[in-house]
Image (tube, rainbow, N blue to C red):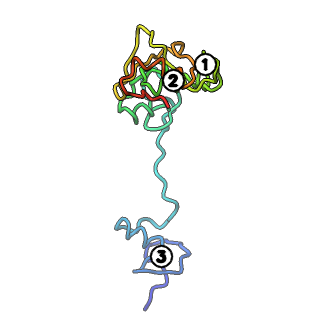
Amino acid sequence: MKATRCSVPACTSSSQTIIRGYCKPHYKRWMRTGDPGPAAIGPQRRPSVPRQTLCGVTDCAEPHLAGGYCNTHYKRHRSHGDVEVVLKPWHDRPGGYAATHLAIRRARGAASGHTCACGAPAREWAYDNADPDELVDPGSGCAYSRDITRYRPLCASCHRHLDAPLRKGDHCGTR
């Protein structure tokens, strides 16, 4: 004879399906845990854990975001594996040749918006080769300066003439 009720004492489930003597909720729990559990079946909730409200780094009063840290310390932990890493802002970090030219364009605009010393429309930002703290890009061998005031807008012809004695066949990123 086929069972019509769940075999768990005092089960009040309205499930019409009986599998191996259990209603569907008790059967699922029995399959998952090996025990059909008590008669009352309700939503399975985890015990509440007190939420951390502040960053776990000493002396940081920022609100908690993830992993026990605030947004800043969480990103440092994910990126560098150390929450105490402090990176300088990009404009204070030593950058390469391309990063310097990007900084010039951001600060002073495109060279095409300026006029060359010869009167022609400027096309490129040119380094004046006079910085005592001159740097050399290891990839291209081009000299450059992080001081954006050391650059002036020149047309392509004047830029080539300025750099010709320094070049030795290398274009140094100019177009």
Q: Residue at x 39, y 24 (%)?
A: 85
- The local secondary structure at tag 3 comes to strand
Which amino acid type is marked by label 3? Cys
Determine the residue positioned at 41% across, 7% down: 132
Which numbered disc covers residue 116? 1
Relative depth, front residue between 145 and 162: 162
Horizontal placement of 108 versus 144: left or right?
right
In this view, 153 is above or below 173: above
Which tag, 2 or 3, sits closer to the chain's start? Answer: 3
Residue hosting label 2: 61
Query: Residue 92's spot in the image, x, y percent?
Result: 47, 18
The structure residue drawn at horizontal position 45% and vertical position 72%, both measured from the top left corner, is: 9
Q: Quadrant of the N terminus?
A: bottom left
Q: Name, please, the residue furthest toward the top.
A: 132
What residue type is disc 2 on? Ala
Task: Give the image location of residue 133, x and y in percent.
Answer: 40, 10
Question: Which residue does the image show at 60% across and 23% down from the upper left?
Answer: 122
Q: Mark 2 and mark 1: span between their CA atoms?
A: 53 Å
Query: Disc 3 and disc 1: Cα gap in Å?
Result: 87 Å
The image shows residue 8, relative to residue 54, as above or below, that is below
Closer to the eye: label 3 or 1: 1
Which of the 4 image quadrants contains residue 21? bottom left
Q: To which residue does mark 3 refer?
A: 23
Q: Give coordinates of residue 169: x percent, y percent.
A: 37, 27
